[in-house]
Amino acid sequence: MNIVIAGIGATARKHLDALRNIGGHDVVGVVGREPGSTAVFAADNGIGHHTLDLAEALAQPGVDAAILTTPTQLHAGQTIQAMEAGKHVLVEIPMADNLADAEAVVDAQQRTGMTAMVCHTRRFNPSHQWIHQRITAGELELQHLVVQTFFFRRENRNALGQPRSWTDHLLWHHACHTVDLFQHQTGEAPVAVSALRGPSHPELGIAMDLSIGLQTPSGALCSLALSFNNEGPLGTTFRYIGDTGTYIARYDDLVDGYDKPIDVSGVGVSTDGVENQDREFVAAVREGREPAASVAQCLPTMQTLDRLERTL
């Protein structure tokens, strides 16, 4: 497989690290937004072709697939563009920032027949996979998923502390992770949703704090608090409260309710969720099958986000 990657930020670097461990492919092109930094990124990572034009990258001879790590607002259009160019696509979460565009992505996948997968990475973190295995085996019934997603972004900067050229979104990006995970773990779409938003940022125009509640038909609850105003430790903590135990997940790591580590090394091929996710994409393309976290499988999450947005 010959792969092009769009985006040169922290997320793009995570994918490159994962791909180095997978093998059987070449990253042959990179697409950036500024000539100098894009050229440096390509040189640093041994990528032979760099450009500011996604169409040019997709048109290079022998390109099979694209990994999109671009700003959220570009995801839907670029995913459709890549599929219509005959390329398989792995797009960063979310596939779109509204339901209509997400539906257009799914329609394009069905029309073109290309493999299209979304980076719903939480499904592939060993910590969450361990929980999922216990739930599907009937060893754990989820009663309440309590999640905190905290960042400090009163200035528009990315994960590397650099000025960001686009505006992030608590609901359509960061809440998307947890809404999808909750629906994946329970196997149910919520029957009840609620959302509250705090004041908007005076310059960015986005809500800096959100509170979200979900309930499934079987009664499982999800309570999600999100903030761009948090000063202190950053990131996301997932507390699974079940009938036979409590577990706390932080990305790839898992502890029980008393902070005792749980060994998840044997859960997946890798202890890195991004690598597990990218392995699934590469395998699905090679095997000509629908990947886990395909755009069609992730559409119910986008439908729930749309319902939440309508409550705000």
Image (spheres, rainbow, N blue to C red):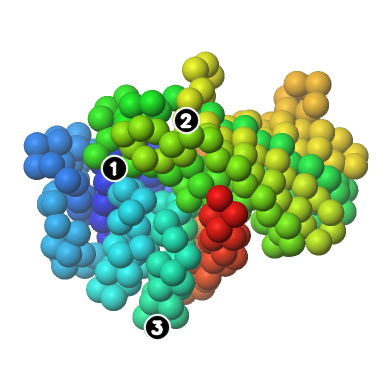
Numbered badge on residue 111: 3
Q: Farthest left residue? A: 35
Location of residue 128 in the rendering, given as x and y in whole percent from the top left corner: 67, 43
The answer to whether residue 187 is left or right of residue 245 is left
Q: Is residue 195 visible?
A: yes
Location of residue 39 in the rendering, given as x and y in whole percent from the top left corner: 12, 40
Residue bearing mark 1: 166
N-term-proximal mark, 1 vs 2: 1
What residue appears at the point 25 percent right and 30 percent down from the top-left corner?
163
Which amino acid type corresponds to the residue marked 3 in the rendered image?
Arg
Q: Nearer the viewer, mark 1 or mark 3?
A: 1
Residue bearing mark 2: 228
Q: Is the Cβ of the residue at disc 1 closer than 8 Å to that at disc 3? A: no
The answer to whether residue 152 is left or right of residue 130 is left
The secondary structure type at the circle numbered 3 is: helix
Occupied quadrant, residue 115: bottom left
The secondary structure type at the circle numbered 1 is: loop
N-term-proximal mark, 3 vs 2: 3
Q: Is residue 274 visible?
A: no
From the viewer's perspective, is residue 62 above or below residue 236?
below
Q: Is the Cβ of the residue at disc 3 closer than 8 Å to that at disc 2? A: no
Which amino acid type corresponds to the residue marked 1 in the rendered image?
Trp
Count residues near mark 2 (Cα–Cα under 10 Å), then give few for <14, some for 14-19, many for 20+: many
Count residues near mark 1 (Cα–Cα under 10 Å), then give few for <14, some for 14-19, many for 20+: some
What residue appears at the point 62 percent right and 47 percent down from the top-left corner?
195
The answer to whether residue 115 is left or right of residue 137 is left
